[in-house]
Every structure is written in structure tokens, then in C-alpha cells.
Image: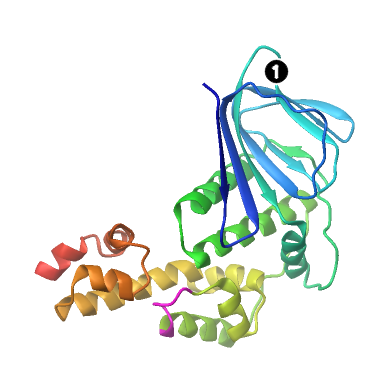
Amino acid sequence: MSKQKFFRSSHVPIELRYSSASHACYKKHTHDEFSIGVVDSGVSEYFNQNNIHLIRAGTTVIVNPNEVHSCNPKKGTSWSYKMLYVCPKWLAHVQGMVLNESNHEFIPFQQNHTNSTVVFQQFQNLVDILIQDNSKLAVEEASITFFSNLFSFINTRNLDFEVSKPKLLNAYHYISDNCHKALSIKDIAEYSYISEFHLIHSFRKEFGITPHAVQLVMRVNLAKSLLKEGQSIASIATDLGFVDQSHFYRNFKKIVAATPLEYKNG
């Protein structure tokens, strides 16, 4: 049976549609959003820029705003796919950070599909984070990273990630001092006088870890101290900004290789 599901992020202007075993067909149409999607299974006929392409599992389709397009399963078959619909103003902001420009319009992508396994896997990773992770920092980080990488890959731009070390250290210390708060990439970038894009890429290059990953490490380190003081696991999870106890347990074990309860009991 065909299943259609929709998910709307509360942190970035992105909507997800995912369909499995779908027989649904669409007339040629347009929409204001930028859209990008992947074929998970089956074969589809993809119309864009007045051409028809036969696409299959592993293909990523790219549709600029207001482009006439359609994507339908091959006659007599079904297919499964995921599609992201993105606000073009937000995407133009990301492109502007990549190019070190401001106040420009959305730049259309030069390809309407790709068979790159890298783009396909990065898309799947972004979808997982959009659905599963309630952290604003994680969602923003993953979204900006994916679309800036896509813009570089499709438009073959050479990107300059260089940011001075003092600014990156300011960002690091800001995260450390505020690790218990619901930080956003914008918060950290504005404090450090860096664009969100350059913060993400240069931070990883300098420290070998993303801003969100640093925040989790700092939270876990603080949790260890609080556990040794005898505070309850439930209160620590809440006070340090974890979504729930399960989120706390999962991330604590990834970093400490033991559960909070095992660590507390020695």
C-alpha cells in the first residue's frame, strides 16, 4: 500500500515529503520553492527543462523554483522517494555566505539531476537529522552544510573557508560557556563575527569536530561532574538541555562508553 508522509522542520524553512510504493502521478507543474529529492527504489520518468530522463534508485533530482517539471513512476510500476521543499530566500542566504556576497537573488542550480553517490548519501543523512534530531543547532548545521556542499558540487565553485583562529576560539568558548542552552548557528556566528557557513566549515577544519558535536561533549562533561555530586539523571538531562532522558543516555554513552547510571554508580 502506498504511503505518503510529510514533515515540516521547526528550525529551518524546509518541508519533507516521503512516499513508499507510490503509484501516484503528477501533471507537469511548478512551485515557488526550490526542491531536491532522491529515488529510493523503482524507476521514474523525470521531466524538467523540456527533457525526459529515466531515473532510478540512487538518483538525486534538483528543481529550481518555478521550473516546469514532473516525476512519475514508469507505467505499471511503483517507486519510493523523498523530496525536500526549501524556501528560496533561505537558500539564497546560504549561497550568499558561500560566495561572501550579500543581498543577491537565488542562483539557479546548473544541473537538474545527478547520480553522485556522495550527494545521495548526504541527502539521506540530512533527512535523518531533520526527522530525528530536535536540536536547533544540529538541524541548522546539517542543513547549511548540505546545501553549501551541493552548491559547490553542482556549480563547481572554489570555496574559501579560511577564518582567523581567534574568531574560532571565541566560538569554541562561547559554546562551552553556553552549552546548556538551546544555541543556534546564528547565535554562535554573530558572537564570533563569522558567517554561519564559514563557522561550520572552518570550525570543523580547526578542531576536527562540528559546533553541535562540541556542545554535546561539553554537556556530557558537565553531566559527569553533576553525576559525581549525586544529582539525579532526570534533572541533569533537563537542566543541560537534552530533549529527554533517552537523548541524554544515547549521547552520554557515545562519548563515555558507559551509561549515566553506570558512571554514577562507579
Q: Predominant secondary structure in magenta?
A: loop
Protein image colouring: rainbow
Q: Position of residue 120 (x, y in %)?
A: 61, 41
Residue 209 appears in the picture as rendered: no
- Left or right of 136? Residue 79 is right
Closer to the camera in the image, 168 or 250: 250
> Picture quarter containing residue 124?
top right
- Left or right of 208? Residue 86 is right
At horizontal 9% and vertical 68% (from top left) the residue drawn is 265
Q: Position of residue 23 (x, y in %)?
A: 64, 21
Q: Which residue is mark 1?
A: 74
Closer to the camera in the image, 59 or 143: 143
Answer above or below: position of 107 versus 118: below
At horizontal 65% and vertical 84% (from top left) the residue drawn is 193
Q: Position of residue 206 (x, y in %)?
A: 53, 74
Kind of residue at disc 1: Lys
Q: Quadrant of the C terminus?
A: bottom left
Q: Position of residue 12 (x, y in %)?
A: 61, 61
Magenta region: 177-182
Residue sitting farthest toward the top: 76
At horizontal 33% and vertical 59% (from top left) the residue drawn is 247
Secondary element under disc 1, as helix, strand or loop, is: loop
Residue sitting farthest toward the right: 50
Q: Residues within 10 Å of mark 1 (few under 14, many from 20)?
A: some
At horizontal 61% and vertical 33% (from top left) the residue drawn is 81
- Left or right of 111? Residue 7 is left
Residue 61 appears in the picture as rendered: yes
Number of numbered discs overlaid on the protein picture: 1
Answer above or below: position of 251 versus 236: above
Q: Is residue 140 magenta?
A: no
